[in-house]
Amino acid sequence: MKTWLKFLLITLIIGIPAFALGPIIWTPSPDIKPTASQMPFFIFLSAIEALLFGFGIAVIIYGWKLVKKVPLQSKNRTLAAFVSLEWLLVSWWPHDNLHIHNGMNAQGLLYIDYIFHVTIIIASLILVHYFFYAIKEKYK
């Protein structure tokens, strides 16, 4: 089976149940009442995030094999970049579902945004560092 097809299957096998389970795991807050015209946009966003979560799991499954092959001198940097990349892929699904569950509770919003936004910022900085390191190593 081709790799892209394996990625697609894992994305769907994980992403579809994630989409269905999101509102069950994180019951929507009664504070949030989207209009009928807003609802398709929320559903679309939720579907994309659940599929991205499934894709992230596929990247973990197939990417980990590649990370294990990295030479020891680059292992820590590569592992940090891999974990950062994974966080950027899989964190949207719980992030938005927690927002929906939390509603307008300001303290909860602070916790959610610090947990997710700060870690996404850190992951982005790690990936920038890794990008420049990889380019420098490749073309020195």
Image: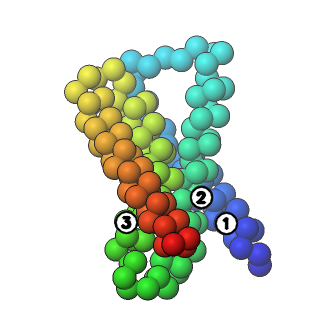
Apparent side of residue 31 relative to residue 136 in the rendered image (left or right): left
Give the image location of residue 84, x and y in percent.
Answer: 41, 58
CB-based contact (under 8 Å), mark 1 and mark 2: yes
Looking at the image, is mark 2 or mark 3 nearer the viewer? 3
Disc 3 residue crowd, few under 14, some 14–19, many 20+, Cα 10 Å:
some
Say which label, 1 or 2, has the lower sequence index: 1
Identify residue for label 1.
7
The residue under label 1 is which amino acid type?
Phe
Quarter of the figure with the N terminus: bottom right
Give the image location of residue 50, x and y in percent.
Answer: 56, 47
Residue 87 falls in image quadrant: bottom left
Apparent side of residue 75 relative to residue 2 in the rendered image (left or right): left
The residue under label 2 is which amino acid type?
Phe
The residue under label 3 is which amino acid type?
Ala
Identify residue for label 2.
55
Apparent side of residue 44 relative to residue 74 in the rendered image (left or right): right
Q: Is residue 121 above or below residue 111?
A: below
Residue at 63% over, 59% down:
11
Say which label, 2 or 3, has the lower sequence index: 2
Q: Is residue 26 above or below residue 70?
A: above
Residue at 28% over, 38% down:
114
Q: Is residue 47 above or below residue 60?
A: above
Marks 1 and 2, how far apart in space?
7 Å
Identify residue for label 3.
80
Mark number, residue 41: none
